[in-house]
Image (cartoon, rainbow, N blue to C red):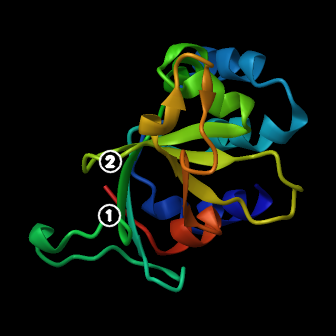
C-alpha cells in the first residue's frame, strides 16, 4: 500500500475526484479494523479520489499503460480498464450486503472501483506485506456460490495488474 500512497502523491495535481467526509471515513475505519487496511483509510483522508474515473490499459505481457484511446468498438476487456473510484460508504455497503461482497471481503478483497464499461467491479487484495505491490483484481460475481456464501476460486478472480501503483502512475483521470 505504501507504493499506492506514493503514486497518489506523485499524481496529486491530476486527481479530479472528491474528498470523502470525515464521518464516512470513520465508519469505514470501524469496519476495517485490521492494520493492513490503515493505508486505504489514509487514501480517503488525504486524496480527492471519490467518484473519479480511472482509465488505463494492460498489455498481454502484463505491462500497465495509458488507456486505449481508440474507437470504443475496439474495446478489449482483457486490456482496457475503466472504473469509478468508490466512496467509503460504498465499500462498507459492498462488504456488508452486496451479492458477493461479504465473500470477497472474507477472501481478503476490498472494492476500490465500479466498472464504468459494463464489467465486474475492481478490488484490491490488501492482506499483503506492507512494501509488496498491491495487485488489482476484478471479482466475477458469476462465480459466487449463493448456497454456500463463497466465491468459487480461482474462477471468481481475474488479475488485472500486478501493481495498482503502476496503474495510477499512467492512468487518465476524469
* Relative vertical location of residue 76 with respect to residue 159 in this rendering, above or below: below
Residue hosting label 1: 77
Instruction: Report x, y in % for residue 69.
Output: 22, 76
Please rate how many residues cluster around mark 1, counting C-alpha atoms within 10 Å: few if below 14, some from 14 to 19, many from 20: few
Residue reaching furthest to the front: 147
| Quarter of the rendering containing residue 57 | bottom left
Where in the figure is residue 8, as x and y percent of width and height?
60, 60
Side of 16 where 33 appears, left or right: right
Whether tag 2 and tag 1 are in contact, CB under 8 A, the answer is yes
Left or right for 24, reference 15: right
Question: Which quarter of the rendered picture does the N terminus lie within?
Answer: bottom right
Q: Earlier in the sequence, mark 2 or mark 1?
A: 1
Height in image: 57 above or below 28? below
Mark on residue 56?
A: none
Image x and y of residue 152, in percent: 60, 38
Q: Residue at x 39, y 77 (%)?
A: 66
4 shown above or below 68: above
Element type where label 1 sits in the image:
loop
Q: Nearer the viewer, residue 132 or 159?
A: 159
Residue, x 56% and y 54% (percent of image)? Answer: 137
Residue at the image point whose x is 51% and y is 31% from the top: 144
Q: Nearer the viewer, residue 151 or 44?
A: 151
Q: Residue at image x 73%, y 38%?
A: 108
Label tally: 2
- The one nearer the camera, 14 or 149, is 149
Q: Which residue is mark 2?
A: 119
Residue 112 pos. (x, y %): 54, 42
The Cα atoms of the two marked residues, 2 and 1, are separated by: 8 Å
Circle 2: element type: loop
Amino acid at each position: 500500500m505504501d507504493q499506492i500512497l506514493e503514486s497518489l502523491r506523485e499524481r496529486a495535481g491530476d486527481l479530479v475526484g472528491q474528498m470523502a467526509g470525515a464521518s464516512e471515513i470513520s465508519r469505514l475505519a470501524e469496519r476495517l479494523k485490521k492494520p493492513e487496511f490503515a493505508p486505504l483509510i489514509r487514501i480517503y483522508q488525504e486524496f480527492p479520489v471519490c467518484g473519479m474515473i480511472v482509465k488505463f490499459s494492460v498489455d498481454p505481457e502484463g505491462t500497465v499503460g495509458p488507456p486505449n484511446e481508440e474507437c470504443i468498438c475496439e474495446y478489449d476487456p482483457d486490456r482496457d480498464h475503466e472504473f469509478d473510484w468508490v466512496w467509503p460508504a460504498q465499500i462498507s455497503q459492498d462488504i456488508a450486503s452486496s451479492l458477493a461482497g461479504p465473500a470477497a471481503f472474507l477472501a481478503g478483497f476490498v472494492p476500490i472501483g465500479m466498472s464504468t464499461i459494463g464489467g465486474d467491479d475492481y478490488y484490491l487484495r490488501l492482506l499483503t506485506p506492507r512494501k509488496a505491490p498491491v495487485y488489482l483484481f476484478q471479482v466475477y460475481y458469476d462465480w459466487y456460490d449463493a448456497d454456500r456464501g463463497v466465491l468459487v476460486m480461482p474462477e471468481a478472480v481475474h488479475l488485472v495488474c500486478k501493481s495498482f501503483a503502476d496503474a495510477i502512475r499512467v492512468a487518465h483521470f476524469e
